[in-house]
Image (cartoon, rainbow, N blue to C red):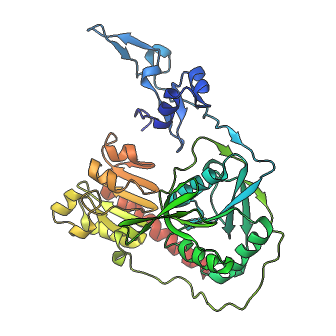
């Protein structure tokens, strides 16, 4: 895995742009190696000085490390490029963002929303992320958050839109944001934004996909038309409404809510999550997908692993054409485009159509015998080995873990 040469499109874009603030830094370092966003050490083969002249008179790259005295040694560490810090000491105004935070982390929709918030904030405003409950996110600074306002308490746990609207009303009275931004999603942002608009007496712009100056464009007519109107205070934005923040690092300074949160008797009672059969979840809505390809030889073991993991089953086109999985379980450009938080690909080499279909997945785990296949290159975590042995070991570990938890609870 460490010998695979990977490209860094962002570093290449910076190297081509002489006006970029990091252009000089990359030129000074020579950009031979760098640390990627997932902790993988990247190499630029064109910037490596060491090499030799081949028999045809062409310069070749020494990949063995013999000419540098590093044969058999793994590169130790590489300095990551430090993004410039964007500081707003005295904000002229605030842009309030209420992300969905599914699973306690920023999703792709949330990052798009923060990118839009930074465009609206400009150089004088500050982006405030309003969070409910605990979270597991550690990269608020790279996502473009200037201030973090955490609102905690049992009243805001689970499905509690009424209590959250009252808390956001307290934020309104304290910060008076110039704009409120919420994701127009099915994960809670769409409903919460409409409730907040009714509470504040604002007419929101929904399904917004573009904000240009004083006007914004939103989808209408079942997505067939655009509705253009003046940019309101409250915006419910669709996915890909803006580019995520990638060129700057922000303070992400915690602030406290000073205003009192009004209390009211809840009219909605949260009875908890309802157990759902993963096989009944449409793949386009599934958060955890176990997908099999031509490398799966024991499909009974594959189905057992999906049951134990509680994952929704998917498959490559080859597996579907061979009759191992139904057509509605095909993942890819010619099947279903998925947006799972975790996509576990077993025995899938990674055709371009399949990689297009999983492009929006947050984390991709690949199990394959070929360390050079395209799925391994795309994956965030790779396991090289026989799929049957790995699935059997996975089932054994999960079963033992659950039995241990049951004994501890008893």
Q: Check the image and report above or below for 146 versus 174.
A: above
- Residue at point 78% right, 71% down? 173
Q: Nearer the viewer, residue 12 or 18?
A: 18
Q: Quadrant of the C terminus?
A: bottom right
Number of numbered markers = 0
Question: Residue 233: x percent and y percent?
Answer: 64, 66
Residue 111: quadrant of the picture: bottom right
Q: Check the image and report above or below for 69 versus 96.
A: above
Task: Mark yes or no: residue 54 visible.
Answer: yes
Question: Residue 387: x percent and y percent?
Answer: 31, 55
Q: Nearer the viewer, residue 121 or 35?
A: 121
Question: Residue 306: x percent and y percent?
Answer: 36, 69
Q: Nearer the viewer, residue 309 or 133?
A: 133
Q: Check the image and report above or below for 159 versus 327.
A: below
Q: Quadrant of the N terminus?
A: top left
Q: Nearer the viewer, residue 293 or 94?
A: 94
Judge from the rendering whether residue 120 lies leftward or rightward of residue 259; answer left or right: left
Which residue in the rendered view is the most extreme toward the left? 322
Judge from the rendering whether residue 301 lies leftward or rightward of residue 239; answer left or right: left
- Residue at point 70% right, 62% down? 178
Task: Mark yes or no: residue 390 visible.
Answer: no
Question: Residue 223: x percent and y percent?
Answer: 38, 67
């Amino acid at each position: 895995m460490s010998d695979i040469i990977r490209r860094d499109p962002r570093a290449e874009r910076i190297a081509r742009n002489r006006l970029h603030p990091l252009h000089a830094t990359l030129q000074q370092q020579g950009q031979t190696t760098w640390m990627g966003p997932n902790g993988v050490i990247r190499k630029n083969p064109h910037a490596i000085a060491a090499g030799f002249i081949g028999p045809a008179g062409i310069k070749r790259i020494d990949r063995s490390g013999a000419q540098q005295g590093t044969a058999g040694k793994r590169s130790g560490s590489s300095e990551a490029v430090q993004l410039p810090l964007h500081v707003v000491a005295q904000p002229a105004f605030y842009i309030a963002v209420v992300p969905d935070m599914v699973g306690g982390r920023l999703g792709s929709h949330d990052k798009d929303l923060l990118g839009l918030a930074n465009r609206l904030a400009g150089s004088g405003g500050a982006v405030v992320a309003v969070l409910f409950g605990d979270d597991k996110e550690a990269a608020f600074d790279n996502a473009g958050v200037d201030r973090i306002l955490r609102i905690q308490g049992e009243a805001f746990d689970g499905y509690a839109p009424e209590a959250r609207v009252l808390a956001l009303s307290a934020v309104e009275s304290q910060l008076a944001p110039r704009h409120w931004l919420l994701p127009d999603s099915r994960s809670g942002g769409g409903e919460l934004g409409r409730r907040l608009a009714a509470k504040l007496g604002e007419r929101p712009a929904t399904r917004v996909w573009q904000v240009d100056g004083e006007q914004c464009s939103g989808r209408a007519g079942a997505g067939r038309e655009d509705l253009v109107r003046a940019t309101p205070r409250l915006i419910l934005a669709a996915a890909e409404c803006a580019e995520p923040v990638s060129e700057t690092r922000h303070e992400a300074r915690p602030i406290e809510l000073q205003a009192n949160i009004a209390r009211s008797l809840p009219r909605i009672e949260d009875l908890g999550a309802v157990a759902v059969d993963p096989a009944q979840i449409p793949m386009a809505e599934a958060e955890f997908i176990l997908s099999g390809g031509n490398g799966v030889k024991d499909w009974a073991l594959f189905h057992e692993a999906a049951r134990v993991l509680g994952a929704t089953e998917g498959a490559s086109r080859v597996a579907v054409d061979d009759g191992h999985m139904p057509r509605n379980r095909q993942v890819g450009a010619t099947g279903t485009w998925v947006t799972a938080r975790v996509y576990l690909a077993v025995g899938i080499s990674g055709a371009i159509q399949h990689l297009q279909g999983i492009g929006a997945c947050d984390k991709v785990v690949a199990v394959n015998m070929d360390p050079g296949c395209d799925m391994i290159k795309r994956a965030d975590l790779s396991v090289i080995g026989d799929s049957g042995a790995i699935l059997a070991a996975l089932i054994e570990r999960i079963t033992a873990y659950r039995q241990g938890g049951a004994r501890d609870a008893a």
